[in-house]
């Protein structure tokens, strides 16, 4: 193993390859179609801390995955739930069936799963880890935050921020990984906040507001 800087904690350490985004969201069939999956330099401790989070994230992605991948993602999600009965029960308890009218005027059943607070935190941890790794890749330094990253939705911005944000997003350059299944960008705003946007499988999108980064 080579020595170097861990992109998460910044320590000099023996480096391991950490799959970012996590390998868990790639079912075997998709994984084998990708020549090489994206990895980042991580120390052993940082690479080894998130098995449960990754598992939940996989289930989350498998639930909302876009049509062209849906069957593969669903299959992988279901095999995880077969092996993790606790998680399966939690998901079932928090899934409600709604009746909605589709475009053809027919009533259809829609399943909606709400995440519990702890599940939401786990999803956040995974997204945050992606942000940290890609932040290092983009800016060449460790994303040190006093836990001020948070999920945000553009509709939650003030009107003047939203205009700035939309303008910046329209000019943003996106980085594409793993055969376009993962795309991300950092959108710096005037007040030194940065919005990290990551899009997985074309339709699963997270916005993370990174505050007080103390830009030079
Ligand atoms: Zn580390």
Image: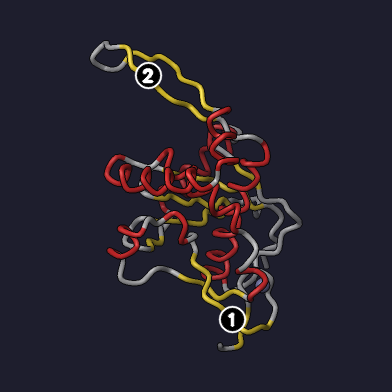
Q: Secondary structure at mark 1?
A: loop
- Residue 157 is situated, as x and y percent measured from the top left of the image, at 59, 36
**Mark 2 or mark 1: whose residue is earlier in sequence:** 1
Vertical relation: 144 (above or below) 110: below
Vertical relation: 127 (above or below) 136: above
Image point (52%, 75%), residue name: 17
- Residue 194 is situated, as x and y percent measured from the top left of the image, at 59, 53
Image point (31%, 61%), residue name: 179
Q: Secondary structure at mark 2?
A: strand
Q: Could you tell me how far apart the alpha carbons at marks 2 and 1 are, in whole angstroms?
A: 48 Å
Image point (55%, 76%), residue name: 41
Q: Label 2: how many residues lie within 10 Å, few (<14), some (14-19) or many (20+)?
A: few
Vertical relation: 197 (above or below) 63: below
Of residues 195 and 62, the one drawn nearer to the viewer in this rendering: 62
Of residues 78 and 137, the one drawn nearer to the viewer in this rendering: 78
From the image, state whether disc 2 or disc 1 is nearer to you: 2
Q: Which residue is mark 2?
A: 109
Q: Which residue is mark 1?
A: 15
- Residue 131 placement, left or right of 149: left
Q: Which mark is residue 86?
A: none
- Residue 57 is situated, as x and y percent measured from the top left of the image, at 52, 48
Q: Label 1: how many residues lie within 10 Å, few (<14), some (14-19) or many (20+)?
A: many
Task: Please state the quadrant of the image where ligand 1 appears.
Answer: bottom right
Vertical relation: 32 (above or below) 93: below
- Residue 168 placement, left or right of 108: right
Quarter of the rendering containing residue 8: bottom right
């Amino acid at each position: 193993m080579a020595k170097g800087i861990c992109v998460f904690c910044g320590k000099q350490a023996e480096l391991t390859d950490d799959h970012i985004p996590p390998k868990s969201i790639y079912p075997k069939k998709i994984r084998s179609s990708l020549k090489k999956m994206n990895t980042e330099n991580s120390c052993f401790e940082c690479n080894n801390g998130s098995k449960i989070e990754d598992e939940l994230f996989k289930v989350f992605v498998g639930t909302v995955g876009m049509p062209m991948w849906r069957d593969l993602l669903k299959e992988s999600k279901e095999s995880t739930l077969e092996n993790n009965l606790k998680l399966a029960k939690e998901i079932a308890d928090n899934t409600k069936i709604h009746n909605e009218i589709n475009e053809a005027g027919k009533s259809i059943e829609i399943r909606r799963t709400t995440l519990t607070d702890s599940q939401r935190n786990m999803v956040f941890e995974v997204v945050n880890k992606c942000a940290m790794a890609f932040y290092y890749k983009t800016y060449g330094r460790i994303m040190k935050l006093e836990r001020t990253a948070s999920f945000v939705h553009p509709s939650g911005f003030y009107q003047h921020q939203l205009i700035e944000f939309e303008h910046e997003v329209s000019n943003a350059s996106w980085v594409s990984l793993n055969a376009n299944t993962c795309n991300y960008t950092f959108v710096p705003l005037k007040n030194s906040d940065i919005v990290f946007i990551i899009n997985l499988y074309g339709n699963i999108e997270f916005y993370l507001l990174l505050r007080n980064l103390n830009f030079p």
